[in-house]
C-alpha cells in the first residue's frame, strides 16, 4: 500500500488509480471528505487544484453509465484549518439508490448497527468491507470507478445433520462426529461426507423433529476418536470430527413448519414422502435455502442472517419464481388463517375489511374497547405477510401524552445542530432503501396525544402522493437542511395503523384526520365462543411484495375508466347521504367519495365481499365517525340516515328496532346509527365513539 489515511488508501501497482475509498455511512448519504494527503492525487488527475471556495462538476463512469457528482473545496470558518476537499453527490438519487444495491453487504450491516443518538461511525468488519476505486481518465474531473463489493470466492455449501440424542453433547462440545465405519465394518457415504465440509459452510442441525441450531464450519474434518461424552453410544471408536460454531434458532423450526412440497422436492435429507431420511450428514441445495431462509429468517440468529443475506443476494427473485404470488382472495384467506392460528377470533370479513382499507389508503385507525386485541390484530396481520420486528418491516411505536409536535415521531435538530432521528423516520429510511417490501408502523394508543399536533405533517405529505415516471412519490417530509444529508419522503411501501381507545385520558379526532383514514371498530366480543380453538393449526408467514398491497388508484379517473358503473352508483348513494348530512353541515367531500370508490373497486377486482357489504363498511368507517353533537340537528341527521338505511322511520319510544337493523340495506351502519340515537336519548349527546 503506497499510503493509507483512515478509510482512504492508494494500493501499489494499479495503473492510473487515484485512490480507494472504504464504503461507510457517508457514501450512501452524500459522498465523502477527502483527506489532505490525497489532494495531490486528485489534482494530478484533474491537471489542476480545486481552489478554495470553488466547485467543479464531476462525472463518475460506473459499469458503462455516467453519474453526476461534484468536487468542492470548502473554506473553513476557522482560518487555522485548511480547506476541505469533498466529493459529493447529494442530489443524485439514482446513484445513491444504486450504491445501496452495489454495496448491499455494507449497507445492511451499517443500518443494522447505526445508533440514531450517536455520531460514532459504524465500522464494517474486515471480512465484509467493500471499496470504491477512482481511476483517472484522459479528461479532467472524469473518473473511471471500479466497484469492489463483497465477493465470496468459494461458494458456501449447505448441509443437514441428523444428530438425534447427541445434539446437546455435540453442541456443548462445538463439533460434529461420525464413525468411519458402520457396526458391520462398512464405510457409509453420509458419514464420509463430513470430509467434504469446508470452512464457512452452513449446517442445519436437526434433532427431535426440529431444526434446533445452525452451525458454521470452523475447521475441516479430521480423523478423531469418539468423544468421551458420547462414548456410551455403540459406535466404532474411530471417526471424523468437524469443528462447528453453533447458533441456536429462536424459536426452533419444526419439520412440519417446512411446507411438504419443499421437502418432497429436496432430495438431500428428505425421502419421496417429505420425511427425514435415516442417516447422519446430507447435502442441502441452495434453492431449498432460498425458500427456507426468507420465510423463517426472523428465527435465525443475527450472525447467520448477515451471512445468508450477503451470500443469497438474489433469494428474493428465486423465492418469487418458486412460489407464485397469491391473488387477493387467497391472500386474505391466508391472513385470516394465520391470525386464527395465533388464537385470535376475527371473522374473515373483518380481515378483508382491514386489507381493503390499507389498499385504498395507507392510513387506518382501529378503535374499540380496551382488550379486544387491536394491537395484536395489526401485529399478526403484518407478520402473516412476512413483516416483523426482527426484519424491521414492522415497528410498534407507543404514543406518549406529551407529544405536541412531530419531533418525537420524526426527529429534531439538537442544540449542537445534529439531527436526532425519530422512530418513524428510521422506518421510512429503511423502507425507502427496500421499496419492494411492505413496512408496517403501528402507532399504539394513537390519541393519547392530539393527533393533529404530532401527525399533521405526515397527513399532509400523504395527500401529496402523485405518479412520477410510474412511481408513487410524495412531497418532502423532512428536508436535507433538517436531516443534514438528504430529503426524506414518505415511501409508497409504508403503511400506518393507529389504535385508539376513547376515555377520559384520550383526545377526540378532528374531521381532518377522519377524512384521511378508514376508521374500523373492533367492539365485537364473544367470550363464550371457544369452538375455534379446537381448529387451531400453526400457519407459516408468506412474505409478499409491496405491489400486492400498494394503492394503484390516486384519482377518481383512475377508477372510472375501468368501473364507470361502480363510480356512478356509489356517487348516487353518497349524494343521498350528503342531503341528510347537510342538516348538520357534516356532508362529505371529494376525498371521501374517491376513497370509497377505490375501496369498492379493489373489492370488485378481488371478488372479496358482496358489494352491498363493502358499501356498508365504507359508510360505517368513512362517514359515521364524522357525526357528533348534542343539538337537534345531530338527532335529525341520525334519524335521516336511519330512514335511508332501513326504509323505516325512527321512533324514540321504539324499544326493539333490531328487526329493522337486520333487514336493512346496510345493517352495520344502521346498527351504529341506532346505538348513537340511543346514546343521544340517554345522555343528550352522542358520537361514533364508545367511551
Image: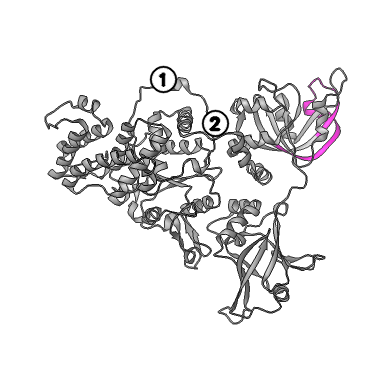
Image position, residue 5 (x, y; %): 72, 68
Q: Is residue 493 above or below residue 679?
A: below
Q: Quadrant of residue 212?
A: top right
Answer whether labels 1 and 2 touch (C-beta < 8 Å).
no
Residue at the far top in the pictured view: 184
Q: Residue at x 21, y 37 (%)?
A: 676
Image position, residue 353 (x, y; %): 38, 35
Q: Which residue is mark 1?
A: 531
Q: Specify whether residue 237 is painted magenta.
A: yes
**185 left or right of 655?**
right
Q: How is the image coloured?
A: one colour
Q: Is residue 611 above or below residue 500?
A: above
Which numbered circle lies on residue 190? none
Report the quarter where the C terminus lies. top left
Q: Residue at x 63, y 37 (%)?
A: 293
**185 left or right of 171?**
right
Report the quarter where the N terminus lies. bottom right
Q: Give the Cα separation between the discs numbered 1 and 2.
A: 22 Å
Q: Which residues are magenta?
A: 215-241
Label 1 or label 2, whichever comes before in sequence order: 1
Res. 510 visible in picture: no
Q: Residue at x 33, y 30 (%)?
A: 524
- Total of numbered circles in the picture? 2
Q: Nearer the viewer, mark 1 or mark 2?
A: 2
Q: Which residue is mark 2?
A: 540
Image position, residue 220 (x, y; %): 82, 38
Look at the numbered disc 2 and give the secondary structure of its residue. loop
Image position, residue 118 (x, y; %): 55, 59
Q: Specify whether residue 470 is painted magenta.
A: no
Q: Nearer the viewer, residue 690 or 429?
A: 429
Res. 604 visible in picture: yes
Look at the numbered disc 1 and give the secondary structure of its residue. helix
Amino acid at each position: 500500500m503506497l499510503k493509507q489515511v483512515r478509510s482512504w488508501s492508494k494500493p501499489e501497482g494499479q495503473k492510473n488509480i487515484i485512490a480507494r475509498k472504504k464504503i461507510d455511512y457517508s457514501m450512501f448519504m452524500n459522498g465523502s471528505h477527502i483527506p489532505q494527503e490525497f489532494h495531490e492525487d486528485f489534482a494530478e488527475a484533474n491537471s489542476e487544484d480545486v481552489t478554495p471556495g470553488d466547485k467543479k462538476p464531476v462525472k463518475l463512469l460506473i459499469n458503462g453509465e455516467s453519474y453526476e457528482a461534484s468536487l468542492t473545496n470548502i473554506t473553513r470558518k476557522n482560518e487555522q484549518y485548511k480547506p476541505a476537499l469533498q466529493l459529493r453527490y447529494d442530489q443524485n438519487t439514482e446513484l445513491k439508490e444504486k450504491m445501496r444495491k452495489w454495496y448491499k453487504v455494507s449497507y445492511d450491516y451499517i443500518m443494522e448497527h447505526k445508533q440514531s443518538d450517536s455520531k460514532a461511525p459504524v465500522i464494517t468488519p474486515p471480512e465484509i468491507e467493500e471499496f470504491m476505486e477512482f481511476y483517472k481518465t484522459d479528461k479532467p474531473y472524469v473518473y473511471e470507478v471500479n466497484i469492489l463489493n463483497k465477493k465470496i470466492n468459494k461458494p458456501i455449501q449447505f448441509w443437514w445433520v441428523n444428530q438425534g440424542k447427541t445434539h446437546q453433547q455435540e453442541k456443548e462440545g462445538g463439533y460434529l462426529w461420525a464413525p468411519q465405519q458402520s457396526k458391520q465394518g462398512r464405510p457409509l457415504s453420509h458419514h464420509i461426507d463430513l470430509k467434504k465440509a469446508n470452512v464457512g459452510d452452513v449446517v442445519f442441525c436437526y434433532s427431535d423433529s426440529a431444526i434446533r441450531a445452525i452451525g458454521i464450519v470452523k475447521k475441516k474434518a479430521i480423523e478423531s476418536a469418539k468423544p468421551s461424552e458420547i462414548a456410551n453410544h455403540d459406535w466404532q471408536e474411530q471417526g471424523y470430527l468437524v469443528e462447528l460454531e453453533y447458533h441456536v434458532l429462536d424459536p426452533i423450526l419444526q419439520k412440519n413448519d417446512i411446507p411438504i412440497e419443499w421437502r418432497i422436492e429436496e432430495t438431500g435429507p428428505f425421502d419421496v414422502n417429505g420425511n427425514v431420511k435415516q442417516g447422519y450428514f446430507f447435502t442441502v441445495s441452495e434453492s431449498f435455502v432460498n425458500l427456507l431462509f426468507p420465510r423463517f429468517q426472523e428465527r435465525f440468529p443475527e450472525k447467520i442472517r448477515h451471512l445468508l443475506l450477503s451470500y443469497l443476494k438474489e433469494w428474493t427473485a428465486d423465492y418469487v419464481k418458486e412460489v407464485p404470488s397469491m391473488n387477493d382472495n387467497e391472500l386474505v384467506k391466508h391472513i385470516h388463517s394465520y391470525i386464527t392460528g395465533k388464537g385470535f377470533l376475527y371473522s374473515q370479513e373483518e380481515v378483508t375489511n382491514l386489507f381493503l382499507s390499507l389498499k385504498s389508503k395507507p392510513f387506518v385507525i382501529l378503535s374499540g374497547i380496551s382488550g379486544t386485541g387491536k394491537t395484536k390484530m395489526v401485529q399478526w396481520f403484518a407478520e402473516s405477510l412476512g413483516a416483523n420486528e426482527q426484519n424491521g418491516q414492522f415497528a410498534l411505536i407507543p404514543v406518549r401524552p406529551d407529544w405536541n409536535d412531530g419531533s418525537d415521531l420524526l426527529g429534531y435538530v439538537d442544540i449542537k445542530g445534529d439531527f436526532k432521528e425519530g422512530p418513524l423516520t428510521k422506518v421510512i429510511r429503511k423502507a425507502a432503501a427496500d421499496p419492494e417490501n411492505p413496512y408496517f408502523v403501528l402507532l399504539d394508543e394513537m390519541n393519547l396525544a392530539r393527533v393533529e399536533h404530532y401527525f399533521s405533517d405526515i397527513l399532509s405529505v400523504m395527500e401529496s402522493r402523485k405518479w412520477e415516471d410510474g412511481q408513487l412519490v410524495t412531497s418532502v417530509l423532512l428536508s436535507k437542511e433538517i436531516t443534514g444529508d438528504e430529503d426524506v419522503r414518505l415511501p409508497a411501501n409504508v403503511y400506518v395503523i393507529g389504535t385508539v381507545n376513547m376515555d377520559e385520558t384520550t383526545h377526540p379526532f378532528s374531521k381532518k384526520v377522519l377524512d384521511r383514514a378508514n376508521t374500523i371498530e373492533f367492539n365485537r366480543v364473544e367470550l363464550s365462543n371457544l369452538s375455534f380453538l379446537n381448529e387451531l393449526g400453526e400457519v407459516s408467514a408468506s412474505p409478499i411484495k409491496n405491489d400486492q398491497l400498494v394503492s394503484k388508484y390516486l384519482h377518481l379517473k383512475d377508477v372510472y375508466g375501468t368501473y364507470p358503473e361502480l363510480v356512478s352508483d356509489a356517487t348516487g348513494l353518497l349524494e343521498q347521504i350528503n342531503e341528510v348530512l347537510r342538516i348538520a353541515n357534516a356532508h362529505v367531500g371529494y376525498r371521501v367519495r374517491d376513497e370509497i370508490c377505490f375501496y369498492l373497486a379493489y373489492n370488485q377486482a378481488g371478488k372479496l365481499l358482496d358489494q352491498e357489504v363493502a358499501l356498508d363498511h365504507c359508510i360505517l368507517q368513512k362517514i359515521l365517525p364524522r357525526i357528533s353533537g348534542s343539538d337537534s340537528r345531530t338527532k335529525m341527521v341520525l334519524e335521516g340516515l336511519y330512514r335511508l338505511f332501513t326504509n323505516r322511520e325512527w321512533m324514540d319510544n321504539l324499544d326493539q328496532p333490531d328487526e329493522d337493523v337486520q333487514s336493512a340495506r346496510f345493517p352495520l351502519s344502521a346498527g351504529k346509527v341506532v346505538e348513537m340515537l340511543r346514546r343521544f336519548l340517554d345522555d343528550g349527546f352522542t358520537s361514533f365513539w364508545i367511551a
